[in-house]
C-alpha cells in the first residue's frame, strides 16, 4: 500500500503519541530531547506524518530552539524530533523520506539550520554533521556524541557556535540574553 506524506493535523495527535511512546521507551530522567521540548509548541506547519491506508506509520516534528553564542550572538535553529516509524513500516525509506521532505519544506520557508539528538550513523547520510564540529553543544555538554546539526542554506553555520537552548530567543532591553528570557510564545 502506498505511503502518503502530509502535514500533521490535530486528528493525528493520538496516533503520533502512540507511535512515539512505542518507539522511545521511557529512560530514567527522561530523554534529553524530550526535556528540551517540554513546554514548547511545535514550529507551525513543519511537522509531517506518513500514512498508509489512512493509518499514521511515521512522524517527524520540529521545535524552536536558539543557539546562544558566548559573545552575545544568537541564532535560531529548529530541533528535529521525535522521528519515529512504526515497526511494520521500517526499513522502507519512510524515516529518510520524512526527514528529506520536512527539511525541504523548512528550507523553502527560510529556516537556516536544524539540530537533533540521534544516531550519527543514521543522520550522517541525511546531511547532518556532529554539532561538536561547529562548537555547538547542549548545556553541560550532554549528548555531545549524538547532537547533530545541518545547514539548510549555504553558510548558515558559518561562525555559528554556542549553547543550544529551548525556545525562541527574546532579547532583553539592553540586548543581553539569558535563558530565563527564552520562551516558546514569542
Ligand atoms: C530510526 C527510524 C526512524 C528509522 O526509520 P525507517 O523508516 O526504518 O528508516 P529508513 O527506512 O529511512 O532507513 C533505514 C536505514 O536506517 C538504518 N538505521 C535505522 N536505525 C538506525 C540507527 N539507530 N543507527 C544507524 N542506522 C540505523 C537501517 O539499518 C536502514 O539501513 P538500510 O536500509 O541501509 O539497511 C525507526 O527505526 C524508528 O522509529 N526507530 C525508533 C525511534 C528512533 O530511534 N528514532 C530516531 C531518533 S530521533
Image (cartoon, rainbow, N blue to C red):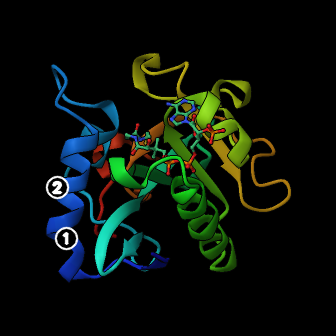
Q: Residues within 10 Å of mark 1 (few under 14, many from 20)?
A: few
Specify the quadrant of the image occupied by residue 48: bottom left
Q: Which residue is mark 2?
A: 18
User: Left or right: where does residue 39 sit relative to residue 139?
Assistant: left
The C terminus appears in which quarter of the rendering? bottom left
Q: Which residue is mark 1?
A: 13
From the viewer's side, name the closer residue of 117 and 21.
21
Residue at coordinates 85% horizontally, 58% vertically from top-left?
A: 154
Q: Residues within 10 Å of mark 2 (few under 14, many from 20)?
A: few
Image position of 138 with respect to 91: above or below: above
From the viewer's side, name the closer residue of 97 and 88.
88
- On the question of residue 136 being in view, the answer is no
Specify the quadrant of the image occupied by residue 24: top left
The answer to which of marks 1 and 2 sits earlier in the sequence is 1
Cα–Cα span, label 1 and label 2: 9 Å
Residue at coordinates 75% horizontally, 47% vertically from top-left?
A: 157
Q: Position of residue 43 (x, y in %)?
A: 40, 69
Amino acid at each position: 500500500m502506498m505511503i502518503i506524506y502530509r502535514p500533521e493535523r490535530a486528528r493525528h495527535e493520538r496516533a503520533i503519541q502512540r507511535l512515539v511512546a512505542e518507539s522511545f521507551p521511557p529512560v530514567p530522567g527522561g530523554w534529553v530531547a524530550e526535556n528540551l521540548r517540554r513546554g514548547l509548541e511545535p514550529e507551525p506547519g513543519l511537522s509531517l506524518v506518513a500514512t498508509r491506508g489512512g493509518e499514521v506509520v511515521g512522524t517527524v516534528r520540529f521545535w524552536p530552539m536558539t543557539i546562544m553564542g558566548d559573545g552575545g550572538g544568537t541564532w535560531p535553529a529548529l530541533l528535529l524530533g521525535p522521528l519515529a516509524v512504526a515497526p511494520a513500516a521500517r526499513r522502507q525509506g519512510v524515516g529518510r523520506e520524512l526527514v528529506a521532505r520536512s527539511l525541504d519544506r523548512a528550507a523553502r520557508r527560510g529556516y537556516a539550520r536544524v539540530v537533533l539528538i540521534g544516531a550519527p550513523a543514521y543522520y550522517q547520510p541525511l546531511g547532518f554533521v556532529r554539532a561538536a564540529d561547529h562548537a555547538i553543544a547542549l548545556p553541560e555538554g550532554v549528548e555531545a556524541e549524538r547532537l547533530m546539526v545541518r545547514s539548510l542554506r549555504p553558510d548558515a553555520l558559518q561562525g555559528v557556535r554556542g549553547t543550544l537552548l529551548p525556545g525562541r530567543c527574546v532579547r532583553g532591553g539592553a540586548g543581553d540574553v539569558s535563558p530565563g528570557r527564552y520562551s516558546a510564545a514569542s
